[in-house]
Image: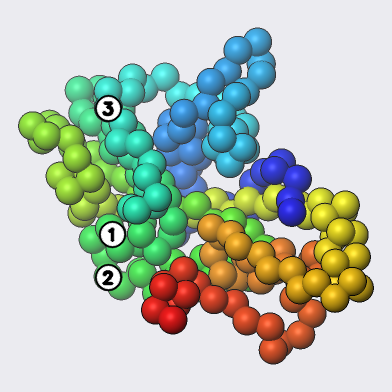
């Protein structure tokens, strides 16, 4: 449905200092490979690495890969004898890791604003440790974090997909979109493509579908 050409549209942090930390986190927490100026890997990660303006040379000592259950990925980097833990993933998951309850509402409001504008929102959080636990697991590492910021990316709809959807509707076929996107992002893309044309058409989350 979309071009799979992700671009960072907007970044948001609590202040300017944290915006700098966000760019550092974007340049470190990824699995993108670069050779002769060509990036390979996940389009979302490539877009963020390019936006952050290159790589920082902090040695990565450990990675907890992304998985769809916890919706997060963590990398650990050694920096001047300390360890910088960076976690990125779905905003609701990252926000839940944060120590500060007071700012969770603010983060959620910003995430929904970005998602409502059709952006896919990736959140970053982190912390510094003097030493690592014996076992590196999500349970031992991904807790008591300090929120860093949000990256909002767009993936423009494909014009030919929009035309195909129009033809389907004209032929009496009802198109249904299934996506891993935030519901507000999904709705924005669905409207741009003509899948949603009125308020009666429903958005159903995976949790709601499982409960039916």
Q: Is residue 39 above or below residue 24?
A: above
**Is residue 16 in view?**
no
User: Can you tell which quarter of the image residue 106 is in?
Assistant: bottom left
Task: Residue 85 in the image: state x and y as whole percent.
Answer: 28, 38
Mark 1 nearby-residue class (10 Å; few <14, some 14–19, many ≥20) = many
Q: Is residue 171 left or right of residue 145?
A: right
Horizontal side of 201 relative to 55 (left or right) equals right
1 or 123: which is nearer to us? 1
Relative height, residue 8 to residue 59 (above, below): below
Q: Residue at x 20, y 23 (%)?
A: 81
Q: Secondary structure at mark 1?
A: loop
Instruction: Using the rendered view, name the quadrant where residue 1 is placed.
Output: bottom right
Marks 2 and 3, Cα distance to the nearest angstrom? 28 Å
Q: Secondary structure at mark 2?
A: helix
The residue to which callout 1 is attached is: 98
Tell me residue 117's x, y (percent): 67, 67
Residue labelled with disc 3 = 62
Q: Where is residue 194? Give x, y as percent.
A: 81, 70
Q: Is residue 75 above or below residue 54?
A: below
Residue furthest out toward the top: 36
Contact between marks 1 and 2 (CB within 8 A): the answer is: yes
Q: Disc 2 marks which residue?
A: 101
Left or right, 154 with respect to 180, comes to right
- Find residue 169 and report its image quarter: bottom right
Horizontal and vertical percent for residue 92? 40, 64
Write the residue at 21% across / 52% down: 143
Q: CA distance from mark 1 to mark 2?
A: 7 Å
Give whichever of discs 2 and 3 has the lower sequence position. Answer: 3
**Reading the chain from its start, which is encountered first: label 1 or label 3?**
3
């Amino acid at each position: 449905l979309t071009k799979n050409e992700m671009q960072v549209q907007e970044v948001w942090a609590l202040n300017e200092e944290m915006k700098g930390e966000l760019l550092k986190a974007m340049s470190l927490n990824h699995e993108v490979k670069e050779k002769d100026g060509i990036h390979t890997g996940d389009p979302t990660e490539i877009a963020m690495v390019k936006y952050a303006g290159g790589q920082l040379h902090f040695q990565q000592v450990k990675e907890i890969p992304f998985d769809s259950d916890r919706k997060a990925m963590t990398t650990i980097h050694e920096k001047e004898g300390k360890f910088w833990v960076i976690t990125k993933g779905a905003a609701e998951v990252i926000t839940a890791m944060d120590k500060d309850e007071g700012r969770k509402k603010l983060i959620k409001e910003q995430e929904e604003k970005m998602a409502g504008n059709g952006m896919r929102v990736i959140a970053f959080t982190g912390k510094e440790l003097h030493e690592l636990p014996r076992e590196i697991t999500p349970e031992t590492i991904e807790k008591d974090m300090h929120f860093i910021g949000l990256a909002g990316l767009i993936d423009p709809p494909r014009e030919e997909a929009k035309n195909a959807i129009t033809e389907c509707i004209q032929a009496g076929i009802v198109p249904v979109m299934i996506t891993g996107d935030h519901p507000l992002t999904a709705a924005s893309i669905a409207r741009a493509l003509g899948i949603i044309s009125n308020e009666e058409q429903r958005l159903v989350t995976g949790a709601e579908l499982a409960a039916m």
